[in-house]
Image (cartoon, grey):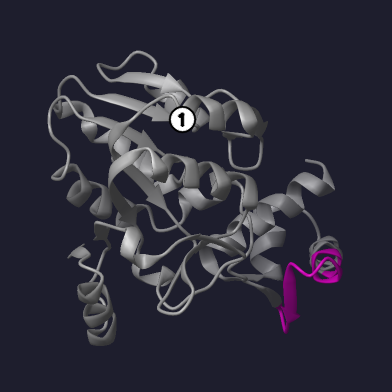
Amino acid sequence: MLAAQRRQKIIDMLHLNKRVLVSDLSKCFEVTEETIRRDLEKLEKEGVVTRSYGGAMLNRHTNEDLPFSTRNAIHPELKRSIAMKAMELIQDGDTLMVDPSSTALEFMKILGTKRNLTVITNSIHILHDFASSNIQVISTGGSLRACSMSLVGPIAQDTVQKYNVDTVVIGCKGLSMDKGITDSNEPECELKKYMLRQAEKVILLADHSKFNKTAFVKLLDLDRVDYLITDQKPEPEWLEQLAKHNIEVIY
């Protein structure tokens, strides 16, 4: 394994476990502890980790644009729980726009029981995984963002504007009472804004870790959301705030 590949795997492990130990990594990758220390030293210089005695911890930031494979591996049980609740809001014959978030992919996996659905998406994973399903899937086209396996840009925006749908299903990086709903990268955020304009109903999928966080790019105000689906009951002040904006909270 190349050193760069090993360091990427270390980053993936950090996103899942928050902390790694030199001794464990040495055994896992079958290299010396000195080699692992050099890897961690390089990652620290890049600002990814902070080294500690015997290991390292991840420098987490809300604006971090993680690879899809890493995001998909974080809290899969929470995403499935949220997806199951979201399915109850979808009816046979609905038209949807679905973003490339990992929670939205879980949502797609359980839609097979619904009939005559049409889904417009910029997610490469959805386009691939559901090519032979009973769901009619329409690609936005556009420029590929390899990190998130999504399609973005003017072509994708033009495609989205051709369709009017019942529902848009989106994820986010942060929910703030002051800043609204935010995300980490601008190209995907811009396309989501186009999706929002074309939908009658907005379903936001967000686990509890997204509350009281603010990411780099403003996506939308709270009052634009119709349904917020999360994995646990929000704090009382959040329930009060969401009720003010007539958002139905499902947890």
User: In x, y percent, where is residue 235?
Assistant: 26, 83
Q: Quadrant of the C terminus?
A: bottom left
Q: Position of residue 2 (x, y in %)?
A: 82, 42
**Residue located at (70% from left, 75% from top):** 55
Packing grade of label 1 (10 A; few <14, some 14-19, many >=20) is: few
Vertical comparison of 242 with 161: above or below? below
Q: Which quadrant would residue 248 be assigned to in this image?
A: bottom left
Above or below: residue 239 compared with residue 130 = below
Residue 250 shows in this picture: no
Magenta span includes 47: yes
Q: Amino acid at mark 1?
A: Gln
- Where's residue 20, x and y in %? 63, 69
Secondary structure of residue under mark 1: loop
Nearest the camera: 105 or 152? 152
Residue at (41, 24) in percent of width and height: 129
Say if 58 sits above or below 102 in the image.
below
Magenta residues span 41-54
Q: Which residue shows up at 34% across the image and 58% down it?
A: 224
Which residue lies under the disc numbered 1? 161
- Residue at x 57% of width, y 46% of height: 190
